[in-house]
Amino acid sequence: MEDQGHQTGPTAGPGHEQRWAELADLVLIISREIQFRRYADERAVHLSQSEGMVMRYLKSDPTATPSRIAAATGLQRTNLSTVLRGLEEKGFIERRAQSDDGRGVTVRSTERGRSNTVLVRQEWAATLSEAAGHDTEHLDAALALLSTVENGLTRSRPQSRPTRPATER
């Protein structure tokens, strides 16, 4: 008998489609619930989704160019400029000229930005742990699955977003 619970092919069966859709719904709902909550620690600063993506990226690439940030986060360069300006105004990042001619720029997280990331992650951990009744039995499996999904989605992200014809704008 074939184990239907571990099929990995693209045609994993119609019974699995509904479960994947349910997983997508749950991920979106959980994400929104996390975003809606206020932080218990008054020092933690709430960031927009785009600002949070940039700060998470800077954890893995501490001195990044705007091009790398845009590619990694899926943000368009014009939107990224606005996000970077906002993070800079909050004191969470700093931009530095990369070369003598000042054309190249690198983005770095400041101590304030790094501290906020730590605080926010602690808040998220406490919130999710409490919501799950502190049950860690399936935590590693959930992390592994969600990491696989995230990596797959990132790898298959369209490189350019389709634009609407001028007549539709």
Image (spheres, rainbow, N blue to C red):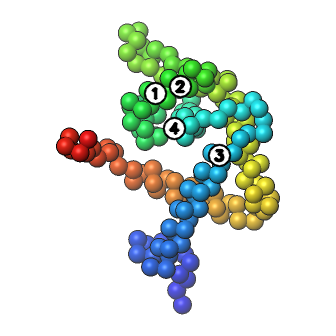
| Tag 1–tag 2 contact (CB < 8 Å) | yes
Residue topped by disc 1: 82
Sequence-first disc among 3 and 2: 3
Residue depicted at x 54% and y 90%: 1
Sequence-first disc among 1 and 3: 3
Residue depicted at x 54% and y 75%: 6
Residue topped by disc 3: 36
What label sits on residue 50 in the rendered view? 4
Sequence-first disc among 1 and 4: 4
Query: For the C terminus, which image quadrant?
Result: top left
Select label 3 or label 2 by which is in front.
3
Q: CA distance from mark 1 to mark 2?
A: 6 Å
Sequence-first disc among 4 and 3: 3
Mark 2: few, some, or many residues within 10 Å (few <14, many ≥20)?
some
Residue farthest along the bottom direction in this orientation = 1
Q: CA distance from mark 1 to mark 4?
A: 10 Å
Residue depicted at x 23% and y 45%: 168
Percent of width and height locating residue 37: 69, 45
Residue depicted at x 53% and y 81%: 4
Q: Amino acid at mark 3?
A: Phe
| Tag 1–tag 4 contact (CB < 8 Å) | no
Mark 1: few, some, or many residues within 10 Å (few <14, many ≥20)?
few
Percent of width and height locating residue 111: 67, 23
Q: Amino acid at mark 2?
A: Gly
Q: Secondary structure at mark 1?
A: helix
What label sits on residue 86 in the rendered view? 2
Q: CA distance from mark 1 to mark 3?
A: 22 Å
Q: Amino acid at mark 4?
A: Ser
In the picture shown, does residue 68 fall above or below 17? Answer: above
